[in-house]
């Protein structure tokens, strides 16, 4: 099994981890109000999820 000869510094570890770029989360449209929302989440504009009202909105 491979064993490192020296301890990796925090700078080297953080530099390696910072190279990974996360993609923006995908967006979908709400079928009721056509607002942009995250998939599999309740719509913050109208408060519905799967054709049911789950959040109270004004």
Image: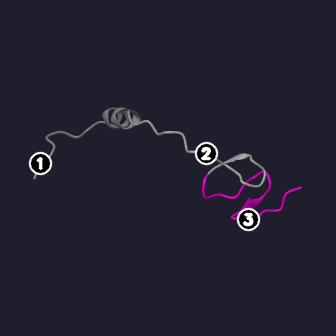
Tag 2, which secondary structure? loop
* Residue in the image at 78% along x and 58% along y: 47
35 shown above or below 57: above
x and y percentages locating residue 34 in the rendered image: 74, 47
In terms of sequence position, does the residue under pointer 1 or pointer 3 come before the other?
Answer: 1
Q: Which residue is mark 2?
A: 27
Residue 2 tag number: 1
Inter-mark Cα distance, 1 to 2 = 43 Å
Magenta-drawn segment: 39-58
Q: Are there few (<14), some (14-19), or many (20+) residues within 10 Å of tag 2?
A: few
Residue 21 tag number: none
* Residue in the image at 85% along x and 57% along y: 57
Q: Which residue is mark 3?
A: 51
Q: Are there few (<14), some (14-19), or many (20+) residues within 10 Å of tag 3?
A: few
x and y percentages locating residue 37 in the rendered image: 67, 49
Tag 3, which secondary structure? loop
User: Is 45 covered by the magenta stretch?
Assistant: yes
Q: Residue furthest left?
A: 1
Label 1 or label 3, whichever lies nearer to me, is: 3
Label 3 or label 2, whichever lies nearer to me, is: 3
Label 1 or label 2, whichever lies nearer to me, is: 2
In terms of sequence position, does the residue under pointer 1 or pointer 2 come before the other?
Answer: 1
x and y percentages locating residue 45 in the rendered image: 78, 51
In terms of sequence position, does the residue under pointer 3 or pointer 2 come before the other?
Answer: 2
Marks 3/2 in contact by CB < 8 Å: the verdict is no
The image quadrant that residue 24 belongs to is top right
* Relative to 4, 9 lies left or right: right
Q: Nearer the viewer, residue 18 or 30?
A: 30
* Relative to 32, 4 lies left or right: left
Tag 1, which secondary structure? loop
User: Is 36 covered by the magenta stretch?
Assistant: no
């Amino acid at each position: 099994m491979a064993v490192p000869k020296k301890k990796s510094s925090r700078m080297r570890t953080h530099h390696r981890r910072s190279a990974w770029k996360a993609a923006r989360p995908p967006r979908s449209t709400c079928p009721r109000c056509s607002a942009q929302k995250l998939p599999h989440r309740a719509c913050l504009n109208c408060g519905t999820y799967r054709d049911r009202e789950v959040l109270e909105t004004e």
